[in-house]
Every structure is written in C-alpha cells, then in structure tokens.
Amino acid sequence: MRFAVIGDMGTGDSSQFAIASRMAAYCNESQYDTVLMLGDNIYPDGNPSDIQSKFEKPYDALLKRGVKFHAALGNHDVKKGRGAQINYRPFNMNGRAFYSFTKGDGLAEFFALDTTDFDPAQERWLAGALAASEARWKLAYFHHPIYSSAKRHGSDRRLRARLEPLFARYGVAAAFSGHDHTYERTKTIEGVQYFVSGAGGKLRRGDLDRRSPFLLAGNDEANSFMCLELTHDQLSFRAIDAAGRTLDSGTVAPREAARSKAASIR
C-alpha cells in the first residue's frame, strides 16, 4: 500500500498549493489512496469557515480521485475548530479526536493521536489498541514531536515520557509528527523510526540544530511532503519538495528485524 504524509499545511497560500500540486502529480504516478494529516490543518485557529480555501481547494485534484485524508489535530486547529474538524467528513475522524484505522488487508494499522489533549483516557485507549492490533506494521501519527532537532519547538519531553514506552513495548515501527516546520528523520530510537514532516505549507528556514544527537537527515530550506510504500518486508519513504526533488529517502524494517539495531538516545 502507498500513502502520503503532510503536516502544518493549512495556510491557503502559494506554498501549500505548490506542495498540493506536487502531491497530485505523484498520485498520478504511484496511485496512492491515503494521506495522513499531522495537524495544524487550518491556520490560524481552525475556523471551519476556512476549510474550503485551506483544504478543499488546495487538494481538489486528490479529493476528486477519491484519495482519503485522515486528520490528526494540531494546536492551531483546536482554538476554534476541534468540533468542526472531528466531524468534517473528508477528514475521516468520525467524531473522534483519536482513533485508528487499518489498510492493506490488515497489513498496517495507523494510530491518530490528539497530542494537544493527551489525557489518561487517551493513554489507556492507545495502550489497549496497540496491544490488540494484529497488523504487521503499527504506525502512529500526531502533531507534537517527541523527538525534534528544531530550535523553535523541539522535542516534547513530557509527551515522550508517556508515548515512547508504549511505542517501544507494542512494536510501533514509525511515528510521524509536525509542529516544527521542517523535515527530519531521526536515528532509530528504542526500535522506532521518528519523522517530523511539518513543512507542508509553513516553513521555518534555518531552524534545525545540526548538532542534535539524534538527527540523521533533515531539511529546513524547502516545503515538503512524504510519500511512502509498505510491503510485508519494508517501509520505503521519500521526502519530496514542491519541485519534485527528493530531499531524503530510505527504508524502515519491521520491528522484529529492527529490535537488535535499536538505539537509546536521550
């Protein structure tokens, strides 16, 4: 199965439209049918009156092809748009701020989290859902990164203390977040590959700290999105800018193969 990932995109400006156009062109080539939205879907405050100009228009070509978007909420979204977004049918949240769904005949299960309000009830749900999942690939996505080398926001350590043990214990292979307006791939940490993909509309040039102990690859000079392909044996990924240039690429192994290579980085 193939899918795309975007974060911090809902600006309604030329940068968002340029990435959306590139996503549509890539869809013509690869036939992906799923997009993960990492939050800050509608700037500046999630106002539902902006959904048409900052979601429906930029992604019109993908929506017409039947591509399904699955949203997570960001801190900007919840100011005025929490209720509107979780009930907006094209975001496929079905009235829930956190949820999971499966793809590829059970090959993968995706876990969308609400990290602006990660309360004990959500934590209990996530532990139970991860434990019950029979998918070969467990993939999590959410807004606030628990590993980020960006200087503006960086790693949310309190959230890390709650999420990382669950990801490591229950076999999450990769986790995607936004919030920092950069692209980043970390070293594998406790068996999990972390990505920040927060440059789908917003961009913060020069924000990456290249001295970070866990930064493996990153870009803070171009708006970008991610495209990924899952098979039984590997997850292949690329980060692509609006001109179609590949900023980063590689593969992730299933957790069974990755455990022996896990690094514990703090």
Image (cartoon, rainbow, N blue to C red):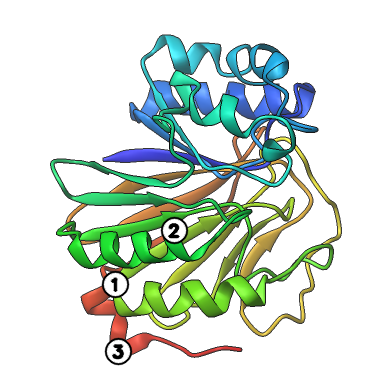
Q: Give the side of residue 39 with respect to residue 33, left or right.
A: right
Q: Which residue is mark 3?
A: 260
Residue at left 13%, top 41%? 105
Q: First in sequence: mark 2 or mark 3?
A: 2
Marks 2, 1: nearer the viewer: 2
Question: Within 10 angstroms of label 1, few (less than 14), some, or many (20 or more) residues?
Answer: many
- Residue at left offset 45%, top offset 39%: 4
CA gap between label 3 and label 1 equals 13 Å
Q: Amino acid at mark 1?
A: Gly
Write down the residue under mark 2.
122
Q: Is residue 68 above or below residue 133?
A: above
Residue 83 position, x and y percent, is 58, 30
Q: Is residue 180 above or below residue 209?
A: above
Crowd rating for badge 2 (residues with CA inside 10 Å; few <14, some 14–19, many 20+): some
**Do the numbered discs 3 and 1 sit on residues whose CB atoms are within 8 Å?**
no
Residue 128 occupies which quadrant of the picture?
A: bottom left
Task: Tell me which label, 2 or 1, sits earlier in the chain.
Answer: 2
Report the amino acid beneath label 2. Gln
Location of residue 15 with respect to 118 vertically, above or below: above
| Residue at the spot of label 1 | 171
x and y percentages locating residue 137 in the rendered image: 25, 59
Circle 1 sits in a helix, a strand or a loop, which is it? loop
How many numbered markers are drawn? 3
Question: Label 2 vs label 1: CA separation?
Answer: 18 Å
Q: As drawn, is 97 to the left or to the right of 134? A: right
Secondary element type, mark 3:
helix
